[in-house]
Image (cartoon, rainbow, N blue to C red):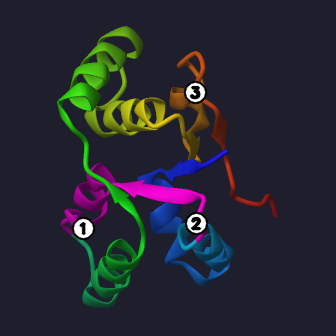
Amino acid sequence: MNFLIDSNILIYSYSNEYEYLRELIVSESCVLSEISRVEVLGYHRLKKEEEKYFKDVFDYASVIMPDRNIFDQAIEIRKEFNLKLGDSLIAATAMAYKLGVYTRNLEDFEKIKGLKCINPIKKS
């Protein structure tokens, strides 16, 4: 199965403690969402070196641009499960492309029937 990487996994990948996550990001079986680009690069306290890292990631990785169908599905997911906008769009994108989701936020995503979610963070 191919996977969509949630924004929180991207953020963790910057840390040396979680550098093993970088292998997922460059894997051919993983993609990113344009929504994650907005969430990550739009963070108001992003430092210059962090911004460069994340821009490089988005330049390198495959990125899905949500279309109207994804937005429509996100509306339904948001209404039914009371998810944040970004999470609704990530879930809708994964479902539209038949992808699982790599996320640390299992609690919200696992509510959605048929959406496979995995937390790739290794427990210490």
- At label 1, counting other C-alpha atoms closer than 10 Å, the crowd grade (few under 14, some 14-19, many 20 or more) is some
Of the residues shown, which amino acid type is indicated by label 1? Leu
Task: Return the residue at label 1.
Answer: 41
Q: 11 left or right of 37?
A: right
The N terminus - image quarter:
top right
Residue drawn at (40%, 64%) of the image? 62
Cα separation, mark 1 vs mark 3, equals 26 Å
Q: Residue furthest right?
A: 124
Closer to viewer: mark 2 or mark 3: 2
Task: Return the residue at label 2.
Answer: 28
Residue drawn at (58%, 66%) of the image? 28
Cα separation, mark 2 vs mark 3, equals 20 Å
Q: Is residue 63 above or below residue 75?
A: below
Of the residues shown, which amino acid type is indicated by label 3? Leu
- Snapshot quadrant of residue 89: top left
Secondary structure at badge 3 equals loop
Q: Which residues are magenta?
A: 27-44
- At label 2, counting other C-alpha atoms closer than 10 Å, the crowd grade (few under 14, some 14-19, many 20 or more) is few
Task: Return the residue at label 3.
Answer: 115
